Amino acid sequence: MKLADQFSVEDIHAALLPPGRWHPYPTITERAQWTSLPADEKQRLVADGEALLGESWPALPATLYMEFARNGNRSRYEAASFARRMMLIRLVLAECVEHQGRFLDDIVNGIWAICEESFWDVPAHNYYTRYPDSALPDTEFPVVALFSAETGSALAYTGYLLDDVLRNRFPIVAGRIPREIRNRLLDPYIDRDDWLWLGFEREPGDRAPNNWNPWIHSNLLAMEMLIERDEARRAEFFHRALRGLDLFLSGYHDDGGCDEGITYWGRAGASVFDCLDVLDSGSNGNITVWDQPLIQEMARYVYRAHIADNWYVNFADGTARSVPDANIIYHFGEKIGDEGMMAQGIVTAARHDEEHPGFLSFNRVLSRVFRPVPQPDSLPAYPLVKQSWLDGIQVLTARETEGSSDGLFVAAKGGHNGESHNHNDIGSFIVALDGQPVLIDAGVEEYTKKTFSPDRYDIWTMQSAYHNLPTINGMQQSPGAGFHASDVSAELADDHAALRLDIAGSWSKDAGIERWTRTIRLDRGADACISISDNYALTDDPESIVLTLMAASGVDVSRPGELRLEGPKRPLLVDYDADLWRVETERIPIDDARMTPVWGDSITRILLHARAPTRTGIFHLNVHAVTQGKFPETHRTP
């Protein structure tokens, strides 16, 4: 599927609405739509704005910006920068609801403060500069990146919603908004092909662009529709964006699997929705591709990676406890005609609508206000699909009973170690019981400078020794696309689901692994069980083989041959051969803003040490639920 081939510049020119005619949401002067909002919604929006009246706008001094270069901290600057943008959004919405001018001075202060910023993005994204060793941005070089595009979009929607008011009372402010957007974003986007996220100047062997591509394009397309008056330039701009989106889509396999994980689906597949939504509404339905199989499969990833409630499969830089945007899920499902996806959106909105992320695009905020997810008297059920095999990214998911969170759930992956937001985790797996992960992928800590640096794999969460994988002679898996699974096959049947793969190629040759065939299998029925079987051959006698299992909570190791793990309702047992393995446990304290809300104050690392490691061998672990009995208070891992 090539969007740029399907829609030429001429097609786009003919299809797009005339300048000024795109009307995605009512402006402040269209009182009927604002006054007809539900009373509690209007009250909430006004209260959000009232809380900010007279508040100072967070300072963004040079020294705060320089923290990223000086000590690797990116969070403090980002928190202040994001707070400015969310303050502006809330004040604008409050003024639109009330329309009495009470919030205008604060809004103008916010617009002016943001327009005065030297750099619209965040320090971690300061890739383009004539001074690579500088801790400050090059103010003569506007950067088109994630949060500069978000900033431009927030200002563009502000100008659109308040256009009449600003032009009458603050014409200088009204005129400054489009000028800043053109100078900082739209012109640089057109003028340069070397934006890395765009993918126009990729070298052979470079991977396809990641979520930055649709995320940035979704904002650029909206800005162009809102402020551009030259129809010919607008058509060229849109066609260029389609060429860029094609490069992002080229990195996807037909199954639509997101190798960046569930957290980034919200800015990968969901941002593709944002782009297509602008194309659809901006052309009065004449530029649409909702019927394309790849687009539909990208959408469905969100429920194929779902465990239960707000728990999701979190390979890569994903967070196990996630709340994807319910509004996006519902409307994406609506566009592709997928009732299961629409149900996913309805239930997610009903149960987790209050769990908003710290930074939310203005367009998505407005969509929540004017295109809310319907809430029927009787909620549908989550789809909770029985099983799926995404052969492109080599991810298997399977549950014991379709449509139910009760019982066992397993996710397992192959792939390679050069994926976007990669962890060295080929052959790893997740086991959930009764809707909650028990054997886990720990996820990722709050981002720092180190996270996306050459030292990324010094971070413990990225290493194979902290995934459910073996470590041979102290050697872990290696990063890079050259380290990958082979001989991969999956089976999906009524009574079982299984993934079989050779993970030997995930280590460097120095590890001396000729073969390490791992089979991860869920058997359904009266004796439901998940089995992990490893069949290996090494080039020499090993000094050590250690198998890691990562557990969400405490572990009872008092009975040889059995690990008893806490589950949400009942224990999960892992049976192992006590003659082959010696057990060690390690409590990993968690004190991180991103991980603590997921796992609490600690997780447990279980290490099975081979008592007499051999050059070849076969071993098995069997995982099953305890039907009765609570987790004992004694023998818990401290």
Image: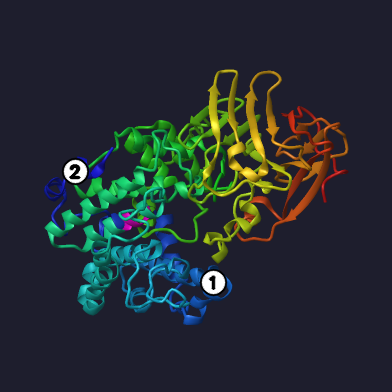
Give me the residue at 76% from left, 44% from top: 606
Up-down relation of residue 331 to residue 621 (above or below):
below
Give me the residue at 49% from left, 61% from top: 358
Say which quarter of the image contains residue 231. Answer: bottom left
Mark 1, Cα crowd under 10 Å, few <14 / some 14-19 / many 20+, is few
* Residue 567, image x, y percentages: 72, 38
Give me the residue at 76% from left, 32% from top: 573
Query: Which of the marked residues, 2 or 1, is nearer the chain's N terminus?
Result: 2
The residue wearing badge 1 is: 76
Give me the residue at 30% from left, 54% from top: 200
Q: Answer left or right for 453 relative to 201.
A: right
Mark 2, Cα crowd under 10 Å, few <14 / some 14-19 / many 20+, is some
Circle 1 SS class: helix
The residue wearing badge 2 is: 7
Q: Answer left or right for 21 relative to 588.
A: left
Q: Main secondary structure of the magenta part?
A: helix
The label shown at residue 309 is none
Q: Is residue 218 magenta?
A: yes
Say which quarter of the image contains residue 92. Answer: bottom left
Residue 568 in view of the camera: yes
- The magenta region covers 215-219
How many marks are shown on the rendered structure? Answer: 2
Judging depth in this view, the residue of 414 and 105 nearest the camera is 414
Up-down relation of residue 55 to residue 33 (above or below):
below
Disc number lying in front (2 or 1): 2
* Residue 306, image x, y percentages: 53, 38
